[in-house]
Amino acid sequence: MKNKFATVIDTAIPLPVQDIDTDQIIPARFLKAISRDGFGKNLFRDWRYLKDNSLNPDFVLNKPDYKGSILVTGKNFGCGSSREHAAWAIADYGFKVVISSFFADIFKNNALNNGILPIEVSDEILSLLFKKINDDHQLSIKVDLEKQVLSFSDRSVNFTINAYKKMCLQNGYDNIDYLLSKQAHIQKFEKENNQ
Amino acid sequence: MAKTLFDKIWDKHIVFQEIDSPAVLYIDTHLIHEVTSPQAFDGLRKRGIKVRRPDKTVATTDHNVPTVDQHLPIKEILSRKQVQTLVKNCEDFGIELYGLGHPFQGIVHVIGPELGITQPGKTIVCGDSHTSTHGAFGAIAFGIGTSEVEQVLATQSILQQKPKTMRITINGALKKGVSSKDIILYIISKIGTGGGAGYFVEYAGTTIQQLSMEARMTICNMSIEMGARGGLIAPDEITYSYLKDKQFAPKGDEWDLKLAYWKTLFSDDKASFDKEYEFAAADILPMITYGTNPAMGIHISEQIPTEIPVHSSEESYFKSLKYMGFEKGETMLDKPIDYVFIGSCTNARIEDLRLAAQIIKGQQKHSSTEVWVVPGSQQVMKQVKAEGLDKIFEAANIPIRQAGCSACLGMNEDKVPAGKYCISTSNRNFEGRQGPGSRTLLASPLTAAAAAITGKITDPRQFL
Ligand code: SF4
C-alpha cells in the first residue's frame, strides 16, 4: 500500500528543457544505495550543484521564488534508463505531479508505481503553462485526478490516464497486490504451458 | 488472422486479462543485476514471500565491478556493498549467480545470449533498459523498473499495457566499413529519441537478414534510444546455428521440438503494423554523434547541422552543443580525442572486438589517447585469447581489461574526466554519462579503433 493520491493544488517548478534523460534526473554514480530512500537530495544533481558542490544559484530548484510539488518539464521527459531511482528521486524530493508534453514509457510506468502522477498535455498547453509560470511564479495549478482535469489561470484541460492506474493511485494499491491475487491463474498457466 | 511476430509471442504469454486493465504477462526469463534489484528483494522480505521461480531467474554483477584486478575486493565501499547485497540475496532466495570470479560473469545482456539462455519466442525482462538486446533472437525482451522486478520475482508475471507495433525495414547491401552500429545510429538520427515511444519495433529486410547475431544484438540493444519499448528480429538459420550447443540451449529431442516452434515465429505476410519505416542500406555510412542524445548523429564526414534538427528544439540543440564544446557547421573529422572506449552491451561481443582488432593490427595506439578495450564477459575474454586478439591489442599498447559495464556509465572506477572527449561504442551520450562533465561521441567499433590509432576522429574506411 502506498499513499493515496488526492487532488493537488499547488505552485509549480518549471524546467523547460526537452529530452531530460534519467542520467540528468539522477546520475549513475548515485545509484549505489540498497534502499529506496534519500535519492531526493541528488535529484538533478549535476545541474543543481556547481563543481565545488555549492548550490548553483541559476538552477530553478535553488531559486527561492519557485516552490511546489508540481514539476513542469519539456518534451520527452525521463528518456534513457529504466532506473526507478529517477522516480524515487522525484518523489523523495517532494514532487507529486510531473507535467510534460511527452514522457518516456518506462519512466511513466515507474512514476505511477511510485504514486507520482505524470500528466501529458499538448505542446501548446505546455508552452502556455511555462509562460504563465514565468509571468507569475506563484501561479496556482489544480490537479483533479478524479475528474482528470488540470486547471490554471482560466484554463482547464482534460488529461488521460489508464483506468486501472487511476484506481491504483487513488487507492494507494500496488501492482504486486493485484498480481498476487491472480496466483491461481499463474499456476494454471504454468501447468498448461509446461513451465 | 494474420499476426505479427510480436503478437504471436505476446498472445502465448497472457496469463490473464481484464477489460480496461493491463495484461498479466508470463515471464520466461528474469535477469537481474546488483543495481536495480536490492530494493525489490527488500520488498519480498517485507511481504514475507519467496521468489516464485528461482529456476527462471539468473543474476550477474556488471555495473559496479572494476575491470582490473577483479580478484581483489572492490575498492569503492558502496559498490562493494551493492555487489555483496546481490550475493546475499541470491543465496537467501536460491538464485543462480554468475558473480565476480565465475567463468560466466559479464554484462547481463552479453551473457544471456552467449549462454543460450536467450531463445526465440521467450519473454525476457531485466531491470535494465537495454534488455531490448535479447530481441535479436525473436524474443519479447524489455527493461523494467525495480517495482516491476519485485513483481516478477514474486509472481513470475508482470502487468503490461500492450504496446503498438512498428516495423523498420532495411534492404540492400551495406557499404564497406559500415557496421550494424552505424545502421542503428542512422535510424535513430532519422526517427528521433522519441520516435519509437509506445512501440515495439520489428527490424526486417534483406540487410537485417544478412547480419550475424552479434550485429543484430547491437541494433536491438539501441531500440530504447529511440524511445521504443523493445526491438525484435524474426529468428532464422543464423539464429539457430548461433544457439546450437550453447550451454543452456535445448539439446536432443528438446532441440527439435523447440526448433519446430521457433520456425513459426515470423510476421505473417498480411500482418499489419501500426507504423512502418523503410531505409536503404546504401544510404548508410559510418556514423558519429556530436550532441548529447543518440539522435544527434551524422555521417562521419558531414558537418554539424546548421539548422535545428527536426526532432530537437532550439534550446536543447544549443545547450547540447555548448556542453560538447562544438559549434554548428563544424566538421567532425580530425577533432582530437582523449579517450576511446570499446565495450558495453552494445559492442563488446567477440565480433565487435574482431572488428576493432582488424584496424588495430600492426598499428600503435596514439600516445595522447587513453584506450579501454573491455570484453562484455569472461567468455568473450576467453574467446579473445583463443583467437589471439589480445596479442594484437597488446602489441598496439592497448591492454585488455576485465569484463563489466566499465566506462559505459560513470558508476564504477572507469570514468572519463570532465571536459574530455571519448569516442565510445556504448549506447548513450547523455551529459555526464561516462562521468561528470564527460563528452561522449557514439560510434562503431571500427570508428573507435581508428581514433585509437590517430588520436582524432577518423573515417575508419581509410584503414580497411
Ligand atoms: S553496458 Fe552500459 S548500457 Fe549496457 S547494461 Fe551495462 S551500463 Fe547498461
Image: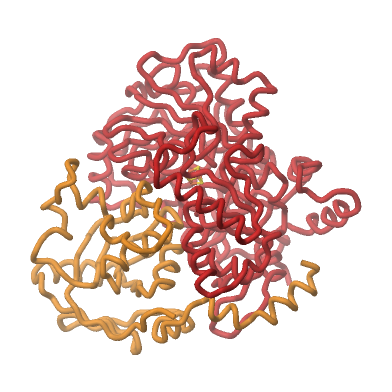
Residue situated in front as seen by the camera: B190 or B5: B5
Give the side of residue B332 with respect to residue B408, left or right: left
Residue B331: give x, y in percent of width and height.
32, 28
The reply to whether residue B415 is visible in this rendering is yes
Tell me: residue B38, above or below residue B445.
Answer: below
Please tell me in which quadrant of the rendered image residue B325 appears: top left
Residue shown at the point (33%, 47%) measured from the top left: B309
Which residue is depicted at the point 10% across and 74% down? A138
For the colour orange, the matching chain is: A
> Chain B rendered in what hue?
red
Quarter of the N terminus of chain B within the rendering: bottom right
Asked whether, in this view, residue B404 is left or right of residue A20, the answer is right
Q: Is residue B223 left or right of residue B351?
A: left
Front-lying residue, A67 or A172: A172
Query: Is residue B310 in view?
Result: no
Snapshot quadrant of residue A34: bottom left
Q: Is residue A130 above or below residue B22?
A: above
Q: Position of residue B437 (x, y in %)?
A: 28, 38
